[in-house]
Structure formats: structure tokens, C-alpha cells
Image: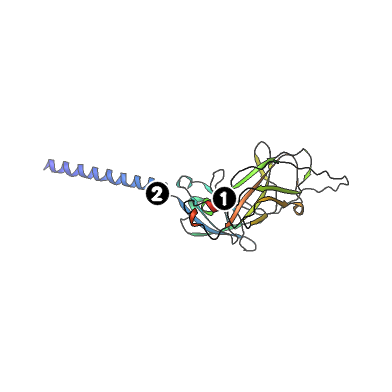
Amino acid sequence: MNNTKYQVKKMTKQTFSTVIFILLFYGLSYSQNSLSIKGRIFDSRSNKPIEYVNIGIFQKNIGTVSNSEGVFEIKIPGKYLNDSLTFSSIGYKTKRVYISDLENDKMINILLVPKTIRLSEVKIISNKLTQKIKGNKAEGNIGLAISESMGYGSEIGTLIKLPNKSVILKDFNFHINYNRPDSAKFRLKIYSYNKSIDTLITNKNIIFTIKNHYTGNYKINLRKYNIVVQNDIFVSIECLAEYTNGYDPAKKDDNYFYDRL
């Protein structure tokens, strides 16, 4: 009789230990799963969708941009589920949302509040302006991946050293060595630079589209934006969208052949 009781107690303890192990294992497995977040971004005043909003985790290499209808989708690896998702766009206040408050594959609506932009004082001078070309004048060979599957919003750029006085930006020029998508949409961004990339200077979206597999020298006219800077700047090109038709069967082994510029 006593022997039987001992066996029952022993079995109960083993079963309890097994249940605890399963629960811990399940919790660990769940925490490592990625989270797919989908949604749409609107202006809080006009209720109109906001295009090309930057979405990502601060100081992490994870991000995307909303499309022309304000719609976005981003996958968050399990190790970042305790971070927050940042929504930022020129002309709006930055918004942060805790990822832990969001549900997997459930559409969410994000409202961004417009902000008032105070322009710097403009001084009218009669002196004749001097034109100079700054930056790298040689043709480089840096590739830019513009695939949606890789996440829109990636940027490449260059540091441009400027004198310690007010400079008006006339245009920005770059050279395209190869261009595989049929067309692609980009945004030019200009940052202040002080030993590292600092704040965004441009207060308007400078968006342009490169069409028909264009290669060669490309110029973006900046005069209408009245951009006045001082000291060094960092200029980058951010990919927003790409459009490709007529895939070549010979390139089927290269999933990203048409997504490079």
C-alpha cells in the first residue's frame, strides 16, 4: 500500500515537470516568431492618406515606406517585439507605437499630426553669387537594392563638404551605371552633418522617377526648393517604389536581377 502511494506521487511530480517544460518551450518558440504589421497612415486633420512615410525601428536596420495610398506592411523579427515602431514624414510630428500593442496580420490605422515648420530668416543680398561644384566628380559603382521584398526605404548617399557660410543648393547630379527595373521612384534627402549624419534639412518631399532603364548623368533641379545650408551636408537617395514588367526567363535564378540600380 505504501509502495503504491509512493509511485503515484512520483508520477505526479514527473507529469508536472513535463508540463512546465512544455510551457517554457512554447513561450520561447513564440518569442522568436516574427510579427507582420499591416496598416494605413492618415493625416489627422484632413483624414487623407499620407504617401511615402518612413516606418521602422530606431537605430535598427529594419524599415519600409508607405505606398502612394498610405498603405504599408513590415515584418518585425521576434527579438525586436519589445521595441517601438517609428512613423516619420516631412511636415508631420514623429509618432512611436509599441510593437507589443500591435497584433499579427491585423490592419491598423495610424494618424500623423501636421506640424508647423518655421523657416529660417531670409537675407537679401546684392553681391554676385559664385557657383561651385562640390562632391565626388568620379563615377562610382555602388549598387542600390530597390526590391519591395528587401524593404523600401533604403538609402545610399555621400558626404559633401561645404564652407562655413550660407550656401544655396542649385542642383544635385549623379551618374547611373546600370538600371534594371523599367522605372523606379526615389526621394532626395539632405541632412546636416557633424562627424555623423544629423537632422534632416529638407522640409519638402523631393521625389523623382527614373524611367525606361535610363543610364548616364542625371540632374535634380533644387532651385525651386530654396535650400540654404551651412557647413557639411550628407545627401542621400532613398528608394520608394519600383516597377518591372516582362521578366527574362534566363534570369530566373536571380530573384533580385530587376531590383538593382
Residue sitting at the far left: 1
Q: Amino acid at mark 1?
A: Arg
Q: Is residue 110 visible?
A: yes
- Choose between 78 and 150: the one closer to the eye: 150
Colour convention of the picture: rainbow
Under circle 1, the secondary element is loop
Q: Does residue 216 appear left or right of residue 153 in this picture?
A: right
In the image, taking residue 250 as reference, residue 227 lies left or right, namely right
The reply to whether discs 2 and 1 touch (Cβ–Cβ < 8 Å) is no
Q: Is residue 249 above or below residue 8?
A: below
What separation in Å lies between label 2 and label 1 (alpha carbons)?
A: 35 Å
Q: Residue at x 29, y 47 (%)?
A: 19
10 Å neighbourhood of mark 1: few (<14), some, or many (≥20)? Answer: some
> In the image, residue 186 lies at what x, y percent?
63, 53
Marks 2 and 1: which is nearer the front?
Answer: 1
Q: Secondary structure at mark 2?
A: helix
Dot placed on the residue nearer the N-terminal end, 2 or 1: 2
